[in-house]
Image (cartoon, rainbow, N blue to C red):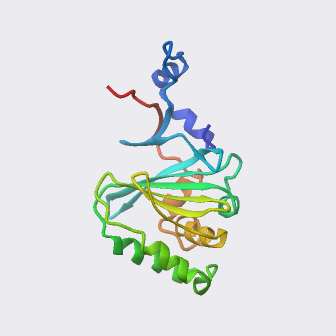
Amino acid sequence: MLQNSSLHKILPLGIALAAMLPARAGEPPAPEQICYEKVCFPEEATLAGETLPALGVGRLTWLMMDIYWAVLYTPAGADTPEEVLADVPKSFIIEYNRSFDADDFVYGSEKLMKRNKRIDLEAIRPRLDQMNALYRPVKAGDRYEVRYEPGVGTTLLLNGEALGTVPGSDFAEAYFRIWLDEKHHVSGSLREQLLGLKTSKNVRRDVAQAPA
């Protein structure tokens, strides 16, 4: 279940009752989703043999424009920045609302990481270059995932396809700070939403619709 109990207060009664109904014989139960407005993500992710609940979902805006929606998955009980940034499995998924070039991701991440004194950029530079080389252009509706598995590394996926993996828990900590660092982050509001510290009235939980 979700870490932030306040989400349950906004669960519509009709959806709650529908979720309680048993599935028809021979059919698996419909998965639950966490949604922000029109964009939905699975409520749980499986990574490194572990089920990770969604800690929080949020939206990044700029000049009144929706840039992207995102969800953060972490182990149950890992809900502080220190616990999330530790050597534990985690996944961060973004769905974009507009097109971006690969260079946009490189420029944005480099800018934030250079400012952050907690990041030893020189130590991770070869691996950061490796990550930067993985990025591809995206269009509205595309999804990037940054997935970390202890002992494996940080994998970048585009629409579910793995593009490459960068080793090291130190690199994962540095890279996830782009969104979760206390000071040098993409957005303070998005950070609070991802960590479950703030919940928008636009967040809801749905039962996924079965394909026609």
In this rendering, the answer to whether 17 lies above or below 105 is above
**Outermost residue to the top:** 25
Number of marks present in the image shown: 0
Q: Is residue 39 left or right of residue 168?
A: left
The relative height of residue 2 versus residue 25 in the rendered view (above or below) is below
Which quarter of the figure is the N terminus placed in?
top right
Compared with 134, 129 (above or below) is below
Along the line of sight, the residue nearer the viewer: 66 or 211: 211
Q: Residue 14, how many percent across, how many down?
A: 46, 21
State whether residue 176 appears in this view.
yes
Locate the C terminus by quadrant: top left
Give above or below for 212 relative to 3.
above
Residue 108 image point, x, y percent:
42, 74
- Residue shown at the point (35%, 42%) measured from the top left: 38
The one of 191 and 78 positioned closer to us in this rendering:
78
In the displayed orientation, state which residue is furthest to the bottom.
Answer: 122
Return the x and y of residue 52 as percentages of the image width and height.
Answer: 62, 45
Q: Is residue 172 left or right of residue 18?
A: right
Q: Position of residue 23 (x, y in %)?
A: 51, 17
Instruction: Give left or right: position of 47 versus 32.
Output: right
